[in-house]
Amino acid sequence: MAEAGAAQPSIRRRLVAYLVTALLLVSVGVALVTYAVANRASNDAYDRSLLDPTLDISEYVRVEGDLTHLDLPQKALEALVYDQVDQVVFQLRSPAGKVAAGVPDLPLPPGMAVGEHRFVDIDYHGAPMRMAALRGSNGAYVQVAETLHKRHQLVAEILTAEMATMLVIALAAVALAWTGIAKGLRPLERLRNELLARSIRDLRPLNATGAPIEIAPVVDAFNALLAQLREASAMQQRFVANAAHQLRTPLAGLQMHLELLLRHALAPDVRDEIERLRGASVRAGRLATQLLALARAEPGPVHDRPLQLLDLRNVAGEAARDWAPRAIALDRDLGFQLEPAVILGDATLLPEIFNNLIDNALRYTPRGGSITVRTGCDGDHAYLAVEDNGPGIPERERGNVLERFYRVPGVTGDGSGLGLSIVKEVAERHGAVVELTPGDDGAGTRVRVVFPRLEPTTAAHEPRRLEHLSRS
């Protein structure tokens, strides 16, 4: 899974890669241009400084017939061609091109006119040099050449300064781009977090407010898909609700006729068959009722009722009146420990939690067993709990029993496997959490539903209603 995630393309990395590639290309281009400009500037500056001693020496050249000589003291000549960094060499040639002074092996540029000067690159004893050549008004040639260390050093300093600046700008651009891209992708992150926070049945449209224009079509397309899913879910809910509602009437009639039939004198084998048929009709009726409750509990546009302030103690009290007679008939001890527990809830759906939890406990608790219903507050969170001393639910099965039509293998009872899934659906509609744990003594099962904290602003809007709930 991690390898698959790493192989997926990243918009952020792709954009940064494009930016870094572009900056590298620009940097290479800038380096080439800077090198050319620096090399030219270096040559221009040092060529002028190289031409100065050439002109100075030319002023002291004397040509007398075939004799050409330099009328300049040796010390002065050495001062003119001295340099701390580079090696400097000098040469004087007669108008006929014969070497009159200086080094003998500097090449003479061809075709120089009187009064003309040139700058040429030469190789002198294996070292590259720059040479200034001048032909004076008397026709004599004066040439001064130096190595290129100062020029290379100046080019390197210019290039280093330019590229250091470029590197700082590039790093700043990458950092700003990374931050800007991250900020620009926040709407995608917000949409991702919104989707991850949803349950699998939350089909509300995504909030497109603030979505960039580039991803708005994706959000619109996804919302259109969600709308189709909502319609399909609503159709399914209507079908289940209608089918369950239509089944309840004939099943109730069948159960009544079977009970009337059992009042007559019947053969033992016939009575047994009718008893089994009556039991099957009762289970089918219960299943139809649970399917109807499940259809009401599932989220959908037709079931989005506003929540109101409710006290779980009152809801549990109503359940006590409904289930106490059946518990007595089944020889189960059904007890209630009820404390105030005010929540925002749906008055139609909340009784389904108590009904299904108590029904489950009655079905799986053996004769003489005890069942306790509790409501109260744990800190800022209201809760309800139903605890029994039945066989309990193995820890490995506690997640599975919340799924629809799932029953723990090997456990006796005539449940349909829908009770706890209805509890889960109603809890999710209220933002509550269902907890399955053993009882206080480590035996049996405790199902605890913890509701979200009631915001103080909500209670402040309805102080009289809240006071009434607390007293009732």
Image: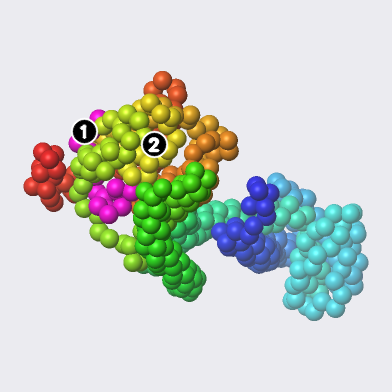
Amino acid of disc 1? Glu
Q: Which residue is denoted by mark 2 in the rendering? A: 362
**Label 2: element kind:** helix
Q: Nearer the viewer, residue 57 or 174?
A: 174
What residue is drawn where x is 54% and y is 39%? 408
Crowding at label 1, few (<14), some or many (≥20) Cα neighbours within 10 Å?
Answer: some
* Magenta residues, start to end: 337-352
Crowding at label 2, few (<14), some or many (≥20) Cα neighbours within 10 Å?
Answer: many
Q: Which of 23 and 155 is in front in this view?
A: 23
What residue is drawn where x is 54% and y is 35%? 411
Membership of 123 in magenta stretch: no
**Label 1: element kind:** loop
What residue is drawn where x is 90% and y is 72%? 96
Q: Position of residue 95 (x, y in %)?
A: 86, 72
Q: In this view, does 120 lie above or below 385?
A: below
Which is nearer the N-term, disc 2 or disc 1? 1
Residue 91 circle label: none
Membership of 340 in magenta stretch: yes
Q: Which residue is denoted by mark 1 in the rendering? A: 339
> Which residue is at the far top?
441
Q: Is residue 83 visible?
A: yes
Q: Report the mark closest to the observer, 2 or 1.
A: 2
Quadrant position of residue 307: bottom left
Q: Is residue 282 above or below residue 467?
A: below
Q: Position of residue 208 (x, y in %)?
A: 39, 68
